[in-house]
Image (spheres, rainbow, N blue to C red):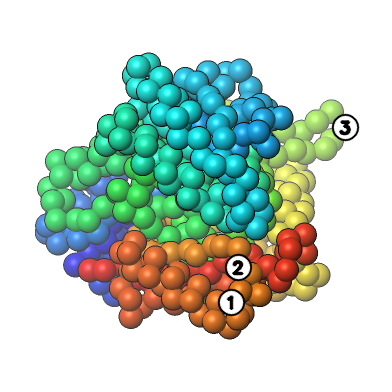
Amino acid sequence: MYKLGIDVGGTNTDAVLIDEERRVVAEIKNPTTGDIYEGIMGAVRTLLDQSRINRTEIRQAMLGTTQCTNAIVERKNLARVGILRIGAPATQGIPPMADWTDDIRKIAAGSQIIGGGFEYDGKELTPFDEEAARTFFEDMKAKDIHSIAISCVFSTVRNDHELRAAQLCREIMGSDVHVSISSEIGSMGLVERENATILNAALYRVAERFTEGFAKSLNDEGVTNADVYLSQNDGTLMTMENARKYPILTIACGPTNSIRGASYLSRLENAIVVDVGGTTTDLGFIQNGFPRESSLAVTIGGVRTNFRMPDVVSIGLGGGSIVRQLPDGTVTVGPDSVGYKITEKALVFGGNTVTATDIAVRLGMAAIGDPAKAASLDETFARKALDAIRTLVEDSIDAMKVSSQDIDLILVGGGSIILPTQLAGAKSVMKPEHFGIANAIGSAISKVSGTFEQLISYDEIPREQALEQAKADAIDLAVAAGALRETVEIIEAEDVPLQYYAGNTNKVKIKAAGELKK
């Protein structure tokens, strides 16, 4: 049995084939094309020709893609959404999409705030206004809208009203309508959770396109026995069905794939990963083998959200970063880059643009292209450029650390050849074998997870009993998502007291992960 892992980046599309023992059988790095699927299939075709394996023996295929991120940032291919908030009159002061820019606000086909919702302790604010909900859904149906976003005040405590609204929506608009409910997507904070839910609803057509397209393309290439999975941004996988239901969870899966791949290749479970591409460098923190989650609200395409995202710092530094000397003698690197055109524009490939890759070749750190074409670069200039690169990375390492102690560093990504191996703040610097395709490996070896998150009153249920039940629920969720029960482990546990809540109330979050069923 073989696994196929693919990760589509802005500069390169990486693919890897691994066997049952997780040994790399074949790997390929191709430039990302304008037609993403053409690029994916080109990589798959080359990989299969290189390995010469029986294509029917590939049983699992995993894809990490930037399609959803691109759709939001570029404002392309987004579906129109009907927006229903349950929370009148308490939440009428701030309407849905209040802080959205006009260029993306146009996805709203209509919005309504109706009666219902809960207090922070789960007590009902007002009864759910079924008649108003029915009227709204009938209006959306008349407008031929196929995607609905439903949010409710404090639905993370109780989601009864959201679930009832979703049921009504399907009864009125049909079973094929795409319904996103906020309690399944975001965390505490109504506006940010609602924003994430609206974006999720707007992405359903994009999700349908890349899930169905990927599966069909594999089938066309003779990969007919593979179960297909999508990478999500917590470093685990989800099924095609869940990807279509929660497409927003694929956002930022690229950095998490690299983090997971780096952890596997290095055998380190606690370290900082520096993933250098052609245009940007992403730094993330491995915590118990999985990406550390951000505790802050995250802005995506100008929209403030609060759904789970990896704690990643991105800087404008990559193998294609343009190097310049200013009139005062200062040397700068990036943030602009030649990107996927590096093989045309970099000096070592016969171009006339000085890039970070040319600097690495000039200083003997890498042997790429024709080193003679970079030999004319002044060594002092090259050293200044390397110092600028070092400063950019060291500052970012410092931002990622949670203490003043030095920490292990793992360098991955094809562009990591531009980095020095001595960096302040690093206890050790490792560049493992197959470092250039760590993202694709991370996709191929990813596990399946389940997360339980809820506010629990320890006045009503003893703490130990509540935590044990939460762990059991998280494990059940992982198994339901496709994990082998005997392999499932608890990988993250939070138990945070909430001082502003009545009584002894804690926010409990438990994450479990396990190996995919074969």
Q: Quadrant of the C terminus?
A: bottom left
Q: Residue at x 26, y 52 (%)?
A: 228
Q: Earlier in the sequence, mark 1 or mark 2?
A: 2
Give the CA distance from mark 1 to mark 3. Answer: 68 Å
The secondary structure type at the circle numbered 3 is loop
Local crowd size for mark 3, using a 10 Å CA cut-off: few (<14), some (14–19), many (≥20): few
Residue on which disc 1 sits:
461
Q: Give residue 357's quadrant in the image.
A: top right
- For badge 1, the amino acid type reads Ile
Residue sitting nearer the eye, 98 or 465: 465
Residue on which disc 3 sits:
328
Local crowd size for mark 2, using a 10 Å CA cut-off: few (<14), some (14–19), many (≥20): many
Q: Residue at x 13, y 51 (%)?
A: 224
Q: Can residue 30 be seen from the camera position used here?
A: no
The secondary structure type at the circle numbered 1 is loop
Q: Relative to residue 496, is residue 416 depicted above or below?
A: above
Image x and y of residue 70, in percent: 48, 33
Q: Earlier in the sequence, mark 2 or mark 3?
A: 3
Give the CA distance from mark 1 to mark 2. Answer: 8 Å
* Label pair 1/2, CB-CB below 8 angstroms: yes
Q: Which marked residue is nearer to the observer: mark 1 or mark 3?
A: 1
Residue sitting nearer the eye, 124 or 105: 124
Q: Quadrant of the N terminus?
A: bottom left
- For badge 3, the amino acid type reads Asp
Give the CA distance from mark 2 to mark 3. Answer: 61 Å
